Amino acid sequence: MKYFRRYGFWALAALIVMGGTLIIFTIIFGGGKDKNGTKDNHYKRMREACDTVNSRNLDIMVYGKDFAPPDNFKYRTVTGFDDYSLALSKDGHNNCSAHMLVINDPNNELFITQDQWMQIKSLLDMNNFYLVVLGDKFGVMSAVGIIDTLPTAGTRSTIIWNGGKSRVPGFSDNPELVPFYVEQDMPNKDEQLLAYTMIMELSTHDLYFN
């Protein structure tokens, strides 16, 4: 009892300090995605992000895996990179602010020929054309001159625009912006998460439109 009276207070104080430190550390480093709010609010945030991207009036073309975005997200699928497949001058596609080609291949399963990459490279010469690659295609992109240097190991996405002069490797690699419950409910997270992160990134940062 004498021992507890002598040391118990300091032991209790130390436990309180350690507990507070753990909480702070968890919030800063380990708290992860924001879990606050109801599932409905999280889905509302995701839909609002889609509306924000839609307001940019982009002609978004997705090649590869269908990532099943929210139903209010405006995009179209394409099967190739030639003029006929992309139909850039077709009514409804030529009155946009910019074209954005999204290659969604998070598991690196797509085979795109070198000639097709050269077609993509020629598209980037257009000042109103964006290229988004979700998946590690950096080796072949470097070989055909789309990028000058390889990004750091583990990079899984990139966005290129402004005639190829502006680029952000890894822009869609961190899904912290994707609402927690939206990510939790994804049936095919491997095929969807990079693309959902792309939507949140495009809706949050003006950098990509300057």
Image: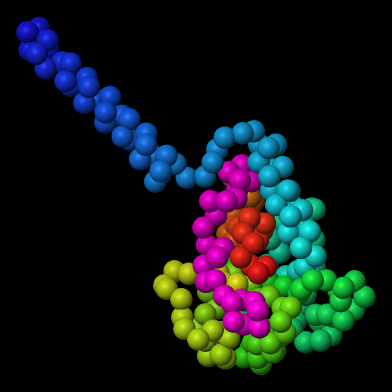
* Residue at left offset 11%, top offset 17%: 7
Colour pattern: rainbow
Can residue 63 be seen in the rendering of this structure? no
* Residue at left offset 56%, top offset 90%: 145
Horizontal arrangement in the rendering, residue 170 relative to residue 25 (left or right):
right
Q: In which quarter of the image is residue 205?
A: bottom right
Horizontal arrangement in the rendering, residue 7 relative to residue 173 (left or right):
left
Image coordinates of residue 24 in percent, x first then y, are 37, 36
Q: Quarter holding the N terminus?
A: top left
Can residue 7 be seen in the rendering of this structure? yes
* Residue at left offset 69%, top offset 87%: 125
Q: Quarter holding the C terminus?
A: bottom right
Q: What stretch is highlighted in magenta?
A: 160-183
Magenta stretch containing residue 179, yes or no? Answer: yes
Image coordinates of residue 53 in percent, x first then y, are 73, 59
* Residue at left offset 74%, top offset 78%: 128
Image coordinates of residue 144 in percent, x first then y, are 57, 91
Say above or below: 188 vs 112.
above
